[in-house]
Image: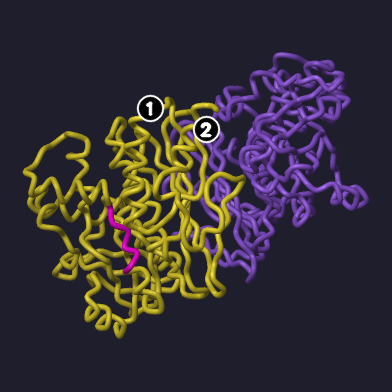
Chain colours: A purple, B yellow
Amino acid sequence: MGEFELIRNYFAAAPCAQGGEGIALGIGDDCALLALPAGEQLAVSTDTLVAGVHFANPCDPFLLGQRSLAVAVSDLAAMGASPLAFTLALTTPTVDADWLQRYAQGLNAMAQRCDVRLVGGDTTRGPLSLTLTVFGRVPAGQALTRSGAQPGDLLCVGGELGNAAGALPLVLGQRTADATIAEPLLAHYWSPQPQLALGVALRGKATSAMDISDGLLADCGHIARASAVSLLIEQEALPLSAALLAFVGDDEARVAALSGGDDYVLAFTLPEAALAPLLAGGWPVHVIGRAATGQGVTLQDANGRDVTPRVRGYQHFHETP
Amino acid sequence: MGEFELIRNYFAAAPCAQGGEGIALGIGDDCALLALPAGEQLAVSTDTLVAGVHFANPCDPFLLGQRSLAVAVSDLAAMGASPLAFTLALTTPTVDADWLQRYAQGLNAMAQRCDVRLVGGDTTRGPLSLTLTVFGRVPAGQALTRSGAQPGDLLCVGGELGNAAGALPLVLGQRTADATIAEPLLAHYWSPQPQLALGVALRGKATSAMDISDGLLADCGHIARASAVSLLIEQEALPLSAALLAFVGDDEARVAALSGGDDYVLAFTLPEAALAPLLAGGWPVHVIGRAATGQGVTLQDANGRDVTPRVRGYQHFHETP
């Protein structure tokens, strides 16, 4: 048995690979088999993380395990889907048992938190990279897409923005900060919490949704294009954390929130009437603007002035860290 | 719009990304949505190909496009599943429009042949590699697994063995050959034909199945282990092509067939009574041995002698080309 087959067996023995509801056949055959209840559809998304591009290398493999699954599962949250399973394609230059064990532990921790099972994958030799494909269940016709926003809808986000981007100087070791500041920011970067429950709560209420991975402005641009509406964002309404404000100040915090990326917080639109029930239900919904006729995304300051930055966030390909 | 988003749009416009039955939502949102008829399960498999490890670099991107999809879809054939959709995670160091166009053309050609649709993926910068995740449909309970072989079953393969391994010196430019020899061998390497129809025909007949990617001996070892049987292979029964025999001679052809890998031909077991109907139906079924009680894989020559090689084929990780 080759060393890469040993890795496969290792992952197959991981707690998150032990099957569950909806998984008719797990790791170990040519394919896994997923079973869906009648009336449900399968949501599918694939994400690749490349060492030195999407994450610093070396880095803590436990944290990487958590983060690699979280960013993939976040796409399920954005569709209002309930996590079912995932596959892991791991490419690694060397077989380092300690690294693999800690990576698998991080993966397991996030898999348990998201209630999702490892059902297959591939392990190959090459420059370090990870491709995760995630599967979720959603009742037919109830998935949240990017294309249904209507003029007049409220534009909302599911939590504070900019924390992960603000954490980058800490991740890269370029700056330090007190634990009260560093810990919440680093936690957001390394262990983002896919807003799965919020996504499910938004079924039948939100007219469009996505998760913020490339920065608020860039991702709102995707909704605006797909829905053929314009989106107006009120700068003063951006939810910013105390830790971020203390670490980088107001101006930089705003830039991180608008263009930083890696938030994995949901952005969505909904009719005004849908807001009160969600707030009453205790859901984290922050109204930051509104949809209108037209196209594009506009940022407005407290005086109603257009302060839209010319560069709309990161390119879809993250150069750093 | 960044260059990697442009690549995404480029693939989204490809013919094989234009939706189809069972695809409720294709490329362009946070997730694709797949719909399954009641009573069917979804077969899922992931394969990674790394440049310089699983394929020579540079190579013809059209041929790589064909091959990358074929080897992934072959896992659906091995389960008796009908292809539905796939995702492509492409990591590339540079954006080369000509390379991408030719790769997409090869991918399209194989997608059309296999009747499978591109529904999503990711495009990132990094060392060249491809991860394809394929999805197929199979009636619940009818998937072919590796674990059902019974003592007394016939061991069969779906076609000639060793052609792809025999083609390697041609692929790597180490040898040349007349077109009558080179063309069929290279075609087998670059454009393997997933045995999808055979897989479907074997539903309810084969007791176990897999596709031969690591070499007959190694892959029969997987069936033997999963089914808790032994498998006896008759060396003289191995189906070898005229081109392979002419190119490398009897002995090397046999080694290629037993240990070469990359055949993507089905290996399967079935009760003796199931053989005649399959042969009468014109299916390419070659009986090469038999399952028995015990464990492991044994190779036997025409005189009944045990001639099992000590090294059972490639490691699961292919060092070349």
Residue B170's quadrant in the figure? top left
Front-lying residue, B111 or B77: B111
Task: Give me the residue at 53% from left, 68% from top.
Answer: B41
Residue B270 visible to an observer of this rendering: yes
Among all residues in the image, which is located at the extreme top? A174
Quadrant into which the C terminus of chain A falls: top right
| Extreme residue in the front direction | A293
Residue B24 percent location from the top left of the image: 56, 58
Q: Position of residue A235 (x, y in %)?
A: 81, 25
Residue hosting label 2: B5
Label whose residue precedes the other's in the sequence (1 or 2): 2
Give the residue type that dot 1 points to.
Asp
In the rendered image, residue A189 lying in the magenta stretch gets the answer: no
Residue at the image point whose x is 53% and y is 51% from the top: B26
User: Bounds of the magenta span?
Assistant: B192-197
Residue picked out by circle 1: B96
Residue at 56% in and 54% down: B25
Q: Is mark 2 on a helix, strand or loop?
A: helix
